[in-house]
Image: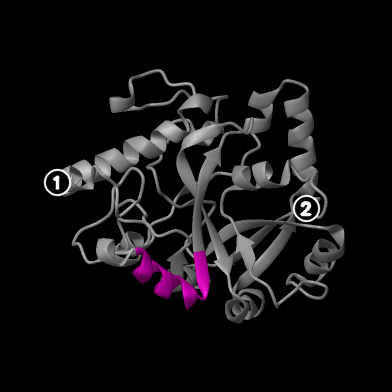
Amino acid sequence: MGAALSEPGPPCPVCRAWSCPTRASSMRATRATWTLVLVQTRLAEAASAWRCTTPWGSLRPERAPSSHPAQALDPMPTLHEIRADHDAETIVVYQAYAAAIAEPAIAAQRFVAPFSFGRMTWIKPSFLWLMHRSNWGRKVGQERILAVRIRRTGWDQALSLAVLTSPEAAVFRSPDEWTRAFAGARVHIQWDTERNVRGGALPYYSIQIGLGRDVIRDYVEKWIVAIEDRTTLVRKMYQQLQGGHADSAAKLLPRERPYAVDEAIGKRLLIDA
């Protein structure tokens, strides 16, 4: 690895390897070409599970099924974009827990024992991604779905402290640079394939934020404004899906729209401008 790291420039945008045989010719490509190759590669990962109505060059996927009426005219999301239910002061994130953790949290409007302050906790602004992760609240230990409204100042603080969970060539000059940054990170950022209401993969990503032990205390004691139990809504939507009424379930989705971030932070976290 030492010899490869001494060479200037990023690794191969397709295989992410610094020693890729095609890297020498790829190095002559412009930055725009590198970006295009990377984007097309990632879009291809979701192609098998997504129904496209136009060629890849002008991707405009068909919505399946129809979205919330208020979202019907929203533009197609970019590849890496924060989408959330937010207002001028707060943003909603979702978490799934067993009743033993969820019920005391709802009662206290903050997380209390047996919630653990000793391990990383992940917060997600995408309702549908959590539905995919928890199987609509049917996985053991994830039966209760909580909508946690937190202060935007806290969310923005988490973004400012975050490091990506993978050594992305667009952000890090070498794997060693990423390793050093990640080792000291108090907050982790992970991009996962977004999902539609039926659980199918979409050709863009959803953000997850992992809060380290020294940040969780701020999350619980300073950031949280309210905790709402969404379990009943989730069960209703799941029953509609099981009955073949995906359009009805989609109408109950929370409104999630783009969340703007500081340009410098966006570049560090792959967030598209």
Residue drawn at the location 20% of the way across and 62% of the way down: 7
Query: Considering the numbered disc 2 on the image, is that residue within a helix, a strand or a loop?
Result: loop
Residue behind mark 2: 142
Q: Residue 53: give x, y in percent of width and height.
A: 40, 18
Q: Residues within 10 Å of mark 1 (few under 14, many from 20)?
A: few
Residue 76 visible somewhere in the drawing: no
* Tally of numbered discs: 2
Residue drawn at the location 35% of the way across and 66% of the way down: 265
- Residue nearer the viewer, 103 or 162: 162
Q: Residue 268: give x, y in percent of width and height.
A: 34, 63
In the image: residue 115, left or right of residue 34:
right
- Residue nearer the viewer, 237 or 30: 30
Q: Amino acid at mark 1?
A: Thr
Residue drawn at the location 25% of the way across and 56% of the way down: 10
Q: What residue range appears in magenta? A: 175-188
Magenta stretch: includes residue 9: no
- Residue nearer the viewer, 64 or 256: 64
Q: In front: mark 1 or mark 2?
A: 1
- Residue 124 against residue 254 in the figure, above or below: below
In the image: residue 219, left or right of residue 244:
left
Q: Which mark is residue 168?
A: none
Check contact, mark 1 vs mark 2: CB within 8 A.
no
Q: Residue 125: give x, y in percent of width and height.
A: 56, 54
Residue behind mark 1: 30
In the image: residue 65, left or right of residue 47:
right
Query: Considering the numbered disc 1 on the image, is that residue within a helix, a strand or a loop?
Result: loop
